[in-house]
Amino acid sequence: MLLAIDVGNTHTVVGLFDGDRLRRHWRLLTEHARTADEYSVVLWNLQRMSGIDPDQIQGIIVSNVVPQMQSTIDAMCVATYGRSPLVVGPGIRTGMPILYDNPREVGADRIVNAVAAYERHKELSIVVDFGTATTFDVVSAKGEYLGGVITPGVGISLEALYSRTAKLYPVELVRPPRVVGRNTVNAIQAGVFFGYVAMVDGLVERIQKEQGSVARVIATGGFAQTIAEESSTISEVDEFLTLDGLRLIYERNREGTGHGR
């Protein structure tokens, strides 16, 4: 089985694949202070509780956008599974030309998402990832990573709103009953919810106009389903797009890497 680990700024998502089937998945907090031993205990116990023998893990692949976490993840993999992970980064085979001015600047998760989206549809695609940042990544009809857009994430925007204003407070992000809120909670919800829907649809339309073609739009990340229900441009939602992309990249690098048995 393959262990796929996506280390994000807020959460670390772990998936366990049996062939191309995602058998189990877990979401953990990304905590810089947590040691490799602590992560090892958490993952070992989660797998045991799911009836999975950790000795069945035959390969590990990691996507990481938090550089200071890499040594911890590496040590955890060696201590728990007796092997170093394959890490998405420069030199890895993705099967996708990166047309960014400096390819090293592109977050690993963004490339992984792009690979998964193109493999699925083989057409002009836009991946909208609602993570700590909300990112838009564009893949050409020929399978080239063209670049994208980075904006503050939904959670960051909500946090900034109540932390920088004296009378506002945290609210749950749900679709409010109307655009014009009649109380402070609904007013905040309307601003963030409908504001992000408008931003997503507006940016997608601008990207499509610039590319001269309608694109397949795939949403992923924590708030994907919430925003997609109101969006007029999002075609589908896939909570596990990044994990699937990691599986694909592992398969493209498995032979000759020494990371599998």
Image: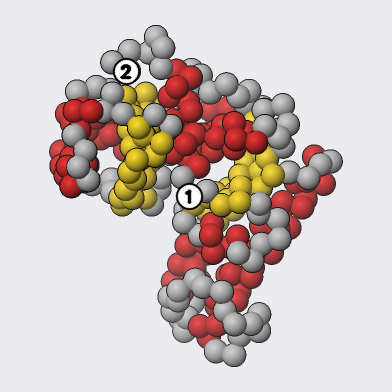
Q: Which residue is mark 1?
A: 239
How packed mark 1 is, by other alpha carbons closer than 10 Å (few <14, some 14-19, many 20 or more), is some
Residue at the extreme top: 256
**Nearer to me, 198 or 231:** 231
Q: Position of residue 32 (x, y in %)?
A: 28, 45
Residue under the image location 81 percent in, 41 percent down: 213
Mark 1 or mark 2, which has the lower sequence index? 1
How many angstroms separate mark 1 from mark 2 (CA)? 26 Å
Residue under the image location 43 percent in, 32 percent down: 20
Q: Is residue 190 left or right of residue 45?
A: right
Residue 121 lies in quadrant: top right
Residue under the image location 49 percent in, 77 percent down: 165
Quadrant the N terminus occupies: top left
Q: Is residue 186 left or right of residue 233?
A: left
- The amino acid type, in three-letter code, at marker 2 is Gly
Quadrant the C terminus occupies: top left
Residue 169 lies in quadrant: bottom left
Q: Which residue is mark 2?
A: 260
The answer to whether residue 5 is visible is no
- Looking at the rendered structure, the secondary structure element under dot 2 is loop
Q: Is residue 94 above or below residue 211?
A: above
Q: Position of residue 101 (x, y in %)?
A: 65, 28
Q: Position of residue 18 (x, y in %)?
A: 35, 32
- Looking at the rendered structure, the secondary structure element under dot 1 is loop
Residue under the image location 23 percent in, 28 percent down: 56
Q: Is residue 158 above or below residue 77?
A: below
Q: Are marks 1 and 2 in contact (CB under 8 Å)?
A: no
Residue at the extreme bottom: 182
The coloring applied to the image is secondary structure
The numbered mark at residue 164 is none
